[in-house]
């Protein structure tokens, strides 16, 4: 197994563990306001707010790292003798 993939998987599991811990221990409500975009305040449980921000971060990271480019690889051409 690729060590880089294993490290990334372990990191994601740790982040998800923190997300679960935050959801279990922060049951209060949180007010969220963003005047240019939202006309009124959102009041949600803290766990849902954490999950929403985590989801936005994951989607942003996926978009920034996805696609594009020519698939690289290494020198596919012949090397001179």
Image (cartoon, rainbow, N blue to C red):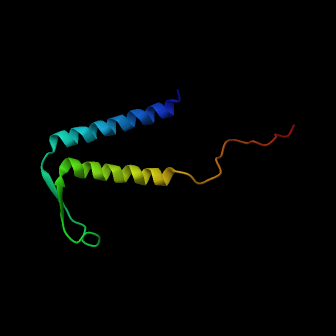
Question: Residue 58 at what x, y percent from top left?
Answer: 39, 49
The answer to which of 56 and 11 lies nearer the viewer is: 56
Mark count: 0
Q: Is 5 situated above or below 36?
A: above
Question: Residue 70 at what x, y percent from top left?
Answer: 65, 51
At 29% from the left and 70% from the top, the residue drawn is 37
Left or right, 58 with respect to 63, comes to: left
Question: What is the quadrant of the C terminus in the image?
Answer: top right
Question: Residue 22 at what x, y percent from top left?
Answer: 21, 42
- Hey, which quadrant is residue 24 in on the image? top left
At 69% from the left and 41% from the top, the residue drawn is 74
Q: Is 46 situated above or below 20?
A: below
The answer to which of 9 and 43 lies nearer the viewer is: 43
Q: Residue furthest top?
A: 1
Q: Residue furthest right?
A: 81
Question: Residue 79 at what x, y percent from top left?
Answer: 81, 40
Left or right, 46 with respect to 8, comes to: left
The answer to which of 45 and 10 lies nearer the viewer is: 45
At 25% from the left and 69% from the top, the residue drawn is 38
Q: Residue furthest left?
A: 28
At 22% from the left and 72% from the top, the residue drawn is 39
Left or right, 27 with respect to 66, comes to: left
Q: Is 51 situated above or below 37?
A: above
């Amino acid at each position: 197994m690729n060590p880089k993939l294993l490290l990334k998987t372990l990191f994601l599991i740790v982040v998800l563990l923190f997300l679960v811990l935050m959801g279990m221990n922060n049951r209060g409500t949180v007010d969220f306001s963003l005047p240019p975009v939202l006309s009124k305040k959102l009041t949600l449980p803290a766990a849902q707010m954490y999950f929403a921000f985590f989801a936005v971060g994951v989607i942003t990271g996926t978009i920034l790292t996805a696609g594009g480019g020519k698939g690289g690889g290494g020198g596919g051409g012949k090397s001179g003798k």
